[in-house]
């Protein structure tokens, strides 16, 4: 990931900013990670849930975590509202995957769609990425709509994927 992002980017949309988290974001990040509704359609092995101490998570986001993924905070009106993640970078085929999760208070406001738009615009205009993928659990219709709004196409339906649960999770695969 460090090859693609030698420096942690700060990306601006119309209503959002995607940037590095700091310890002052710990209370809101804790609220996000403790939300059962947010995480019911997400993998179990996400970095922000790896450590009990949320400050340890933030301290290690841009060292230990950066080997495999880049996690940025999503901010609107100056406040933390969620996370955006870039992961699964494959330099040899110029491919990366994206993900996002928002605090429940920010659902339905178009912020997930704007997050995806900002990520994909940056990746296609400022990097050598040629393929962007995403995965959604079958029951996560809201995330599917976000991807469709941003020009992603469904390429595999109900494909088994390791999301960290005891059995493979049927999920939809998207590409842009």
Image (tube, helix red, strand yellow):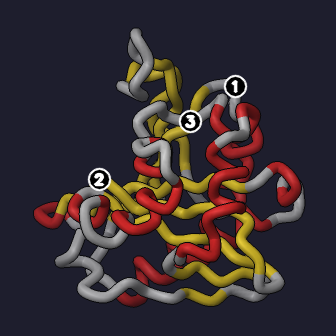
Identify the element where label 3 is drawn: loop
Q: Which mark is residue 139?
A: 1
Count of numbered labels shown in the rendering: 3
Which badge, 3 or 1, comes first in the chain's sequence? 3
Q: At x 63% / y 76%, what residue is drawn?
A: 24
Check disc 2 and report the residue beneath it: 88
Q: Nearer the viewer, residue 8 or 24?
A: 24
List the single residue furthest toward the left. 92
Q: Position of residue 157 (x, y in %)?
A: 52, 26
Closer to the observer: label 2 or label 3?
3
Quadrant placement of the N terminus: bottom left
Q: Which mark is residue 51?
A: none
65 over 74 or under it: above or below: above
User: Mark 2 touching mark 3, by CB under 8 A?
Assistant: no
Q: Position of residue 131 (x, y in %)?
A: 35, 62
Identify the element where label 1 is drawn: loop
Q: At x 31% / y 88%, what residue is drawn?
A: 7
Q: At x 29% / y 81%, what residue is drawn?
A: 5
Check disc 3 and report the residue beneath it: 42
Q: Position of residue 151 (x, y in %)?
A: 61, 61
Q: CA distance from mark 3 to mark 1?
A: 11 Å
Q: Quadrant of residue 149?
A: bottom right
Question: Alpha-carbon neighbours of circle 3 within 10 Å: few (<14), some, or many (≥20)?
Answer: some
Question: Alpha-carbon neighbours of circle 2 within 10 Å: few (<14), some, or many (≥20)?
Answer: some
Q: CA distance from mark 2 to mark 3?
A: 16 Å
From the viewer's perspective, is 87 left or right of 64?
right
Q: Position of residue 87 (x, y in %)?
A: 35, 57
Q: At x 42% / y 28%, what residue is drawn?
A: 163
From the viewer's perspective, is 1 left or right of 87?
left
């Amino acid at each position: 990931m460090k090859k693609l992002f030698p420096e942690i980017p700060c990306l601006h949309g119309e209503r959002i900013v995607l940037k590095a988290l700091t310890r002052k974001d710990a209370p809101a990040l804790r609220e996000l990670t403790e939300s059962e509704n947010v995480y019911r359609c997400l993998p179990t092995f996400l970095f922000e849930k790896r450590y009990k101490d949320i400050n340890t998570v933030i301290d290690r986001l841009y060292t230990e975590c950066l080997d495999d993924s880049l996690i940025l905070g999503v901010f609107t009106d100056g406040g933390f509202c969620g996370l955006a993640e870039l992961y699964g970078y494959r330099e040899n085929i110029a491919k990366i995957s994206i993900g996002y999760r928002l605090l429940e208070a920010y659902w339905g406001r178009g912020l997930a769609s704007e997050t995806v738009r900002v990520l994909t615009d940056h990746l296609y205009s400022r990097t050598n990425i040629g393929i962007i993928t995403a995965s959604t659990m079958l029951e996560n219709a809201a995330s599917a709509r976000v991807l469709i709004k941003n020009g992603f196409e469904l390429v595999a339906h109900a494909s088994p994927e390791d999301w960290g649960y005891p059995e493979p999770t049927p999920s939809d695969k998207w590409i842009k």
